[in-house]
Amino acid sequence: MKNISLKLDDQIFGETEDILSKIRKPRNRYINEAIDHYNKLQHRKLLQKMLKRESDMVKEDSMTVLKDFEDIDYEN
């Protein structure tokens, strides 16, 4: 484990302490879980941005292929 120094806004610290007293969870565990949750959220946002960028890159080709399929005559 790594030790860090953390400065919290007074309001955030107060809310956190209030919640911790109600859920009876150690502050360290609570902060670790919060950061883990936030990291997962950020990974999802990065993935979404990457997929959007890649989708935009192939959009024109995909539309061309779709048009080609629509133009195929399926009658025997």
Image (cartoon, helix red, strand yellow):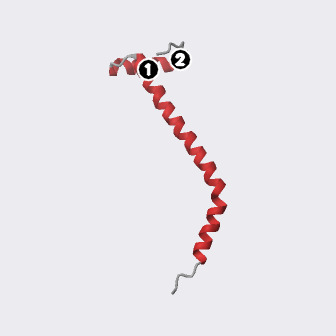
Which of these two is toward me, 74 or 7? Answer: 74
Residue extending farthest to the bottom is 76
What SS does tag 1 mark? helix
Task: Tell me the quarter of the picture where residue 50 sits.
Answer: top right
- Vertical comparison of 66 with 41: above or below: below
Going by the numbered disc 1, the residue's amino acid type is Thr
- Vertical comparison of 44 with 51: above or below: above
Q: Could you say where residue 73 lies in the image, as x and y percent from the top left?
A: 57, 82
Going by the numbered disc 2, the residue's amino acid type is Leu
Q: Could you say where residue 17 lies in the image, as x and y percent from the top left?
A: 42, 17
- Vertical comparison of 38 with 71: above or below: above
- Whether pointer 2 and pointer 1 mark residues with C-beta atoms closer than 8 Å, the reply is yes
Q: Residue at x 53, y 81 (%)?
A: 74
The residue beneath circle 2 is 8
The numbered dot on residue 16 is: 1
Q: Residue at x 62, y 71 (%)?
A: 67
Which of these two is toward me, 9 or 39? Answer: 39
